[in-house]
Image (cartoon, rainbow, N blue to C red):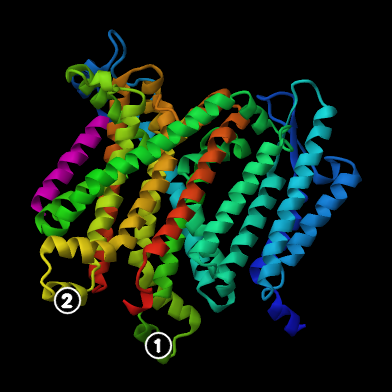
Amino acid sequence: MIGIRTHISPPGLLFAILGLASLLVPFMTLAANRIVAGEGISVLRIAGPTITAPGVAAVTIGLAMGLIAKWTRLRLLGAVFGLAGLLWLLSRSAPILLSQAGEYARVSPAAGFWCLVVIFMLLMADALAALKPGPLMRGILLFAILVALVLVLRSGMLSDLSVLQEFSSRRDAFFSEFLRHLGLAFGSLAAAAVIGFPLGILCHHRVALRGATLPVLSFLQTIPSLAMFGLMIPILGWLGSTVPGAQAIGIAGIGFAPAFLALLLYSLLPVVGNTVAGLASTPPAALEAARGMGMTSSQRLLRVELPLGLPIILTGLRIVLVQNIGLAVIAGLIGGGGFGTFVFQGLNQTATDLILLGALPTVVLALTAAILMDILVELTRRTPEETV
Amino acid sequence: MKTGRILRSVLIALLLALVLRPDWFVPIFAPFAPDGGPVIYQRASMLSLSLSHLGIVTLASAAATIVAVALAILVTRPAGAAFRPLSRTITNMGQTFPPVAVLALAVPALGFGAGPTLVALFLYGLLPIFENAVTALTSLPRATTQAARGIGLSRLQRLLRVELPLALPVTLTGIRLSIVIGLGTATIGSTVAARTLGEVIIAGLLTNNTAYVLQGGLIVGLFAVLIYDALVQLELYLTGRMGG
């Protein structure tokens, strides 16, 4: 008995218990139209046994495969197996549920489904953490997951779900808000880098400037996002109406400009702070050696301090990118566009699917950006951490 | 240091005036209001909105602190060590979730009102506190923990008298991060009908009344900056007291 118990992974056991419990929670929701609250339907009633039996079996087997601590690859496979089971249940039951309901009926996944998705993703993450894949492998995995996601969405097997019905009725708007969101997040990141790097380098050399800049930037960072976005409106509105030509290049109280400026202000602290920290992280011996070789101070900066500080500087950019992707949602409130447009429209109309149409892509985008930047940071790390 | 103290008292006075005597600011905000429109938000008193706002943040942060510290103690004991890689993954990935998205996703599950805001604040607030508490509990000076064992303290005594007090300053940094994020997220909470100061800003945005936006934005911003500053001072005091 003790022999077996030591082989069982405690997180795996927790996932199995939570996963089986999630099967008892409503798996799908059926609503009469897109506004009213739906009625939860248990996994056993979403379709006939020819559909539910294989699906539930796949989920249960997937959870069981996650139990043995040492068989990490089996645990990973269990997560994939379980997710495939969930996809089967979702795609097969949706058309059946819809065919039994009224014309405007909407069907969507419910709490039970989402809990199981999270549990299998955590199982996957737990197994992956034990496998310790290198940066290249992680990149391939991320790419494979994203491709699988796109293929599933494009295949039309989920097109009966209400989120995707919401998507198909505003396909063009979705892609233009997507581009707008990327423009806000990456544009402000680029602007912050252009301003922040030189400022960081200056702060590295001038202690007095550093003492004045960093506290101001960290106070800016604490201002709640809604207040920051709101306060940009009078400032830019005033600029737009007083500075000649400002309106012509799009500077106005509402829209893209105030959202962009607010994001830029939030981005400065991580960029400047991490540039200073990165430059300061150069080992004194390396600096000594560079000086001994007769390098000028700008040569030292470009050839020694910047390359060695690059991982820390990139970490700052990672923080900014993930933060901006999230904060750009607020732009939807001040007419700045992006996925926030759907989120806040959905909140106004109490249309859950519209909220999801804005929130889910934002989450996927933020996670993807975080994983990609982590890989980049690891690739730029020249010396192993232990030897520093 | 001295200019800092003067600036702090000026900001506190400004905040108190904005919350308690909003009418004083009519001449300043009037140019931003639409012609003939109201200048000062009248639908609710600033004081009640502030108290409700701070109440939501306090409740969520207190709950998040208790749960996060308990979980951090759990995964740093031998019995919970198997959960540590998983908990690290969850905190890393969880923090990439935008707070607004967490709030928006809580609505389908919990409906409108203070409920989803509290849950979103609580869940999101857990992560920085947990992360910092685990870091603090796993990086205690070895000499100290061994000395505690050497003088015969039991596991529980070591936890309560040595490990937790030493972990306090770093944990407090996590609590500060969580409170600052919470103040911001609670502001957005008014889009899901929680009673917070965000209501004033949203009302201004919906009616094109920049005076409201300024009024709400200034109060929220001042609260955030002053609370952040107070918590930093508290951390400095505690670190100093421990000779860190």
Can the viewer see residue B94 in this picture?
yes
Q: Which residue is mark 1?
A: B146
Residue A344 lies left or right of residue B110; in this view the side is: left
| Picture quadrant of residue B219 | top left
Quick one: SS at disc 2?
Answer: helix
B9 falls in the magenta region: yes
Q: Is residue A79 left or right of residue A305?
A: right
Q: Residues in magenta? A: B1-18
| Image position, residue A172 (x, y; %) | 55, 25
Q: Which mark is residue A289?
A: 2
Q: In this orientation, which residue lies closer to the viewer: A68 or B158?
A: A68
**Other-residue count near label 1 (Cα within 10 Å), few / some / many at <14 / 14–19 / ≥20:** few
Residue A219 visible in the displayed image? no
Foreground residue among A124 and B95? A124
User: Magenta region, mostly helix, strand or loop?
Assistant: helix
For the residues bearing labels 1 and 2, Cβ distance under 8 angstroms: no
Label 1 in the same subunit as label 2: no
User: Is the residue A336 above or below the residue B164 in the image?
Assistant: above
